[in-house]
Image (cartoon, rainbow, N blue to C red):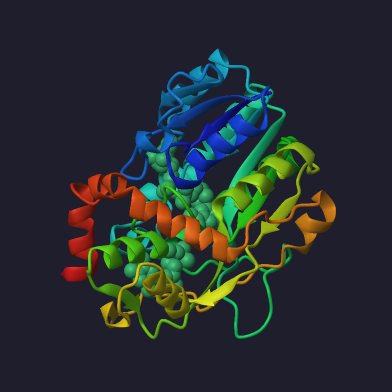
Amino acid sequence: MKILVTGGAGFIGSNFVRFMLSKHSDMEIVNVDLLTYAGNLENLAGLEDEPRYTLERGNIADPDRMNSLFEEHDFDAVVNFAAESHVDRSIHMGAHDFIMTNIYGVQVLLDASREHGVERFLQVSTDEVYGSLGAEGLFTEDSPIQPNNPYAATKAGADFMVRAACETHGLDAVITRCANNFGLYQFPEKLIPLMITNAIEDKELPMYGDGLYIRDWIYVPDHCSAIDLVLRKATAGSIYNIGGEHDLTNLDIVSLILKLVDKPESLIKHVKDRPGHDRRYAMDSSKIRADLGWEPDYSFKDAMDATVSWYLDNSDWWKRIRSGEYQEYYSRMYEK
Ligand code: NAD
Ligand code: TYD
């Protein structure tokens, strides 16, 4: 099987490339990535000499580039991770790149997949398309699509374009909607790596609002195994929620991180809240469990221990990121 992975130099994409190459000896992967601020070839270190892996730099929103890539390679399937993925950037730095990559780029990939006879298109989506939950209940695949921030709105737009390609043009397409991921190689603008790296450096930990916002956390290899199953086993047109089934407030997560790195709670600083901040996400994963037999391989505790240890042992990786463009972003976001 030869697959196109888009956004494979980012956090989840790079974990997925490694996961698939080690799990399936007959799998060939072409990774197309624009290498934006979030794309990092260090995430794929060690794969340079892997004959089943090829890296192509390219923009999924460039139809000529995508068409020549699809012509050159005869892809059996496409797994689309490429996205602008950070909610705060979509609020504070404008939605243009989010619309171009997350909606238009997806349409370019759908058209190219159709024209070149790709047998399966998998769109990696998010629980954020459902909006926010009240104190009770879980998101199911039938929950209404009610995105509240520009990032989530573009991901919802993409889901609708995928549905339309399937219903109207008969493209074999499936969608996964996953909870908040954490793990190795996550860019330190997202909650868990931001708080780990700030705590290691004795910097303040910026907690939005009261810190009682709830997210469902999943360890990235468990997301990868779910995508692998959906890619190979799901029926055309299906949608699957993937949850970590581990709901925690942001304050609980950050307290746990502080314990693991042995730093005081006094580092926590409550700051101005995120506008349109979704109060609670929680996923019902019973459909993927029942239909495809998916279950997570890792306990939350082991996964958090492994993640914190990795950031402690790999400070070169995140210190390089935290110089350059990141400094400008951090100062704009948290200091100005
Ligand atoms: P990320 O920001 O770490 O990586 C995104 C990657 O896409 C980067 O390598 C970037 O260079 C690349 N990219 C961006 N624009 C591109 C373009 N126009 N053409 C080609 N490549 C481009 O993101 P992530 O956290 O790994 O998320 C991957 C996917 O998973 C996204 O689609 C996201 O919406 C979805 N998702 C993420 C989470 C999460 O918790 N991180 C949860 C559910 C779903
Ligand atoms: P984030 O990692 O940005 O993921 P998402 O917004 O996609 O769920 O944020 C997770 C939670 O952490 C969210 O409730 C916002 C909160 N948060 C903070 O309190 N402080 C921060 O500096 C960041 C980045 C997030």
Point out residue 11 in the picture as x, y percentages from the top left corner: 45, 46
Q: Position of residue 253 (x, y in %)?
A: 46, 73
**Residue 177 image position (x, y, % from top left):** 63, 56
Give the quadrant of the C terminus: bottom left
Tell me if residue 169 can be seen.
yes
Q: Quadrant of residue 232?
A: top right
Q: Using the image, determine if residue 49 lies above or below residue 326.
A: above
Residue most toward the top? 72
Residue 285 vs residue 116: left or right?
right
Image quadrant containing the N terminus = top right
Horizontal relation, residue 69 to residue 19: left or right:
left
**Extreme front residue here?**
262
Judging depth in this view, the residue of 273 and 159 nearest the camera is: 273
Front one among 61 and 315: 315
Give percent across and percent down for residue 173. 70, 40
Judging depth in this view, the residue of 23 and 2 nearest the camera is 23
Q: Residue at x 40, y 65 (%)?
A: 191
Q: Is residue 20 above or below residue 103?
A: above
Quadrant of residue 136 within the rendered picture:
bottom right
What residue appears at the point 18 percent right and 47 percent down from the top-left corner? Answer: 324
Instruction: Determine whether, in the image, residue 80 is placed left or right of residue 267.
Output: right
**Quarter occupied by residue 79:** top right
Please report the residue visible at 50 percent of the width from the left and 20 percent of the height from the top. 50
